[in-house]
Amino acid sequence: MTKIMQLCVIYNDEFAERVMGNLINASNYCLSCGFTCNYCRQLYSSFAADIQAIYKTRPNLPAFIDEPEKYLPHDLPNCDIILAIGLHPDLLVAISTLAEKAKAKAVIVPLENRNWCHRGLQRQLEKSLSEIEVEYAFPKPFCTLEETGKSAIDNFVRRYQIGNPLVEVKVAGGMITDAQVLRSAPCGSTWYVAQQIKWTKISDIEDTVAVAHHAFPCTASMDIDPEINEPILHIAGYAIRKAVKDAVKRAQKDAHA
C-alpha cells in the first residue's frame, strides 16, 4: 500500500494540464479512441484529492526576471511533492525557496523541452535542493522517471503508477491479444497505446506503437537536444517501444514455459 501524498503543481505549459488530467482521470479526459472506447481507464483511480494546489504562472513574462518571487505563489500549502512544469528558467531558480516554505519532500522538474532547464541551472538546483535535504528529479522526458531509491519520488511513481511505461500483454498465434497498463507515461498516452496494439501482429509492433505514440499525441519537443543529440520526443518513443517489446518477450517466454 502506497502512502497518501499531497501534490502542488506550478506550471506554464499545457503539458502540465495533460499530466493533471491523467491523475484526476475525469471521464472526458481521454477521447482518443472515439466511438471505439472501451473505458479502459476505469481501471485507474482518480487522485484529484491529492492535488493541494495548482498555480499557473502568467503568460508573456519578461525575458529576464530579477525578482522571481513576484511571479510565484506566496501561499503555497505544505505538500510532499512540487511538480514544476514548463516554468521560465528564472522562476525555477526560486523553486528551492518554495520547496522549503512548503516543507516539500521532493521537487520534480520534467524536461519535455531543452529550453525548460539547461544543464547549468539543473546543477544549481540540485545543489540548492540537496542543501535543504529535498529530493529532486529532472526526467527528460517525464516518461523516463523511474524509482531510484529516493523515498518520496519512489512513492510518487508507485502511488500514481506513472513514469517509465510498463505494460503486460497476452500473445497467441503471432498476435497481441490483450494489453494491460501497469505504469503509464505521466501524460496518460500508454493507455491509448495499449488499446491500439491489441490484435496487432507481433512482427508489426514497432510501427504500430510508433504510430499510436505520435497519434495520442506526444508533445515532447522535436528540436535536437544537444545533451542527447536527438529530439526529446524520440526518447519518449524509445521508452514506450521498449516497454511493449519487453512485455511481448515476457509473454512469449511464459507461453513456452
Image: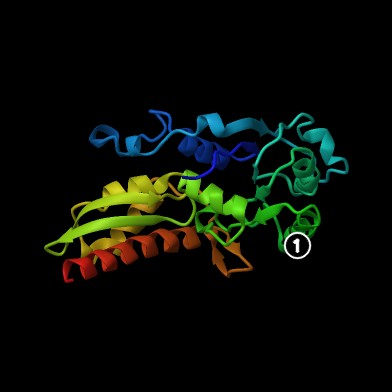
Residue 121 position by quadrant: bottom right
Amino acid residing under circle 1: Arg
Q: Which residue is mark 1?
A: 123
Q: Residues within 10 Å of mark 1 (few under 14, many from 20)?
A: few
Q: Horizontal and vertical percent for residue 125?
A: 76, 56
> In the image, what residue occupies the spot 60% across and 54% down?
151
Residue 211 position by quadrant: bottom left
Q: Nearer the viewer, residue 122 or 76?
A: 76
* Residue 43 at least partly seen: yes
> In the image, what residue occupies the spot 53% across and 29% down?
49
Left or right relative to 165: residue 52: right
Residue that protrudes farthest toward the right in the picture: 66
Left or right relative to 181: residue 255: left
Circle 1 sits in a helix, a strand or a loop, which is it? Answer: helix
Circle count: 1
> In the image, what residue occupies the spot 79% across and 34% down?
71
* Residue 111 at least partly seen: no
Residue that protrudes farthest toward the left in the picture: 173
> In the image, what residue occupies the spot 38% across and 35% down?
30
Q: Horizontal and vertical percent for residue 91?
A: 77, 44
Q: Horizontal and vertical percent for residue 76?
A: 73, 32
